[in-house]
Amino acid sequence: MPDLSAFSLQDKIALVTGASRGIGAAIATGLQDAGATVFGLSRSGTAPQGVTAIPCDLSDDKAIENAFRMIAAHGGRIDALVNAAGISIPPQSTESELARFRATLATDLTGVYATIVAAYPLLKKAGSAAVVNVTSINSIRGFPGNPGYVAAKAGLAGLTRALAADYAADGIRVNALAPGYVATEMTAKSFADPVMHEERRRHTMLGRWGQPADMVGAAVFLASEASAYVTGQELFVDGGWIAKGLAISSDSKS
């Protein structure tokens, strides 16, 4: 039998942002199942059962400061930080497109960096820690109608590489997990639309949408010592979306 102990998070302390729902909630539960004590940040202040929930708006520097004061008092260190919080603002929902762009970056990029900066002393104290930034297939592909989200995810991929270089000397690995189309509240509109749902399903090599639980294995790998020699990387968990070339019909293989 192979030795899988490196995947264990027993006695580790993990923090997951965006832990109230979707991918963040699934990862928080998965890290807990792998043995970690898990704190979950979210604007709603809710988290899965067994996860210590802390209310925090990542666009508010003071809220981040208060959240990490609480975490420091409880654990004293962070072994794994997963930045899964993110927003996607529909068009015409703010006073201008520029306001929409700025609001998206405030949470999806600047908020992530503010979280990492606040976590840094606790990550350094762990001696060997991991940061996992949840990006998207948007980080390397152009998608229409939401330039702020695409820019934020591309920026987060770049930030991942930059901080991997900056933090390596402190024993902190920084990687990204990039989901494809996953059935969450954020994608509910396209998931429910028969035409949009089918377009996205057919573009995926594995022929289906992802589920939040599909992200857990990669998150545990990147958060654990199983990835001890991995840093500065972006792992796509997309059912083959990025790799797919020619769209092949069901009755043709040429």
Image: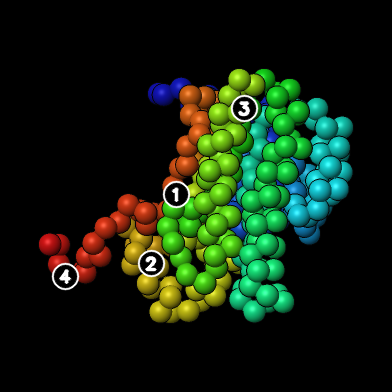
Label located before the other in sequence (3 or 4): 3
- The residue positioned 43% from the left and 79% from the top of the image is 194
Which residue, given by chain and number where applicable, does mark 3 sit on? 167
Residue 29 against residue 251 in the figure, above or below? above
Label located before the other in sequence (4 or 1): 1
**Residue 72 percent coordinates (x, y):** 83, 32
Nearer to us of marks 3 and 4 is 3
* Measured Cα–Cα span from mark 4 to mark 1: 27 Å
Neighbour class for label 3 at 10 Å: few (<14), some, many (≥20)? some
Neighbour class for label 1 at 10 Å: few (<14), some, many (≥20)? many
Label located before the other in sequence (3 or 2): 3
Nearer to us of marks 4 and 1 is 1
* Measured Cα–Cα span from mark 3 to mark 1: 25 Å
Who is closer to the viewer here, 91 or 207? Answer: 91
Which residue, given by chain and number where applicable, does mark 1 sit on? 237
The amino acid marked with disc number 2 is Arg
Which residue, given by chain and number where applicable, does mark 4 sit on? 251
Secondary structure beneath disc 4?
Answer: loop
Q: Quadrant of the N terminus?
A: top left
**Residue 151 percent coordinates (x, y):** 55, 57
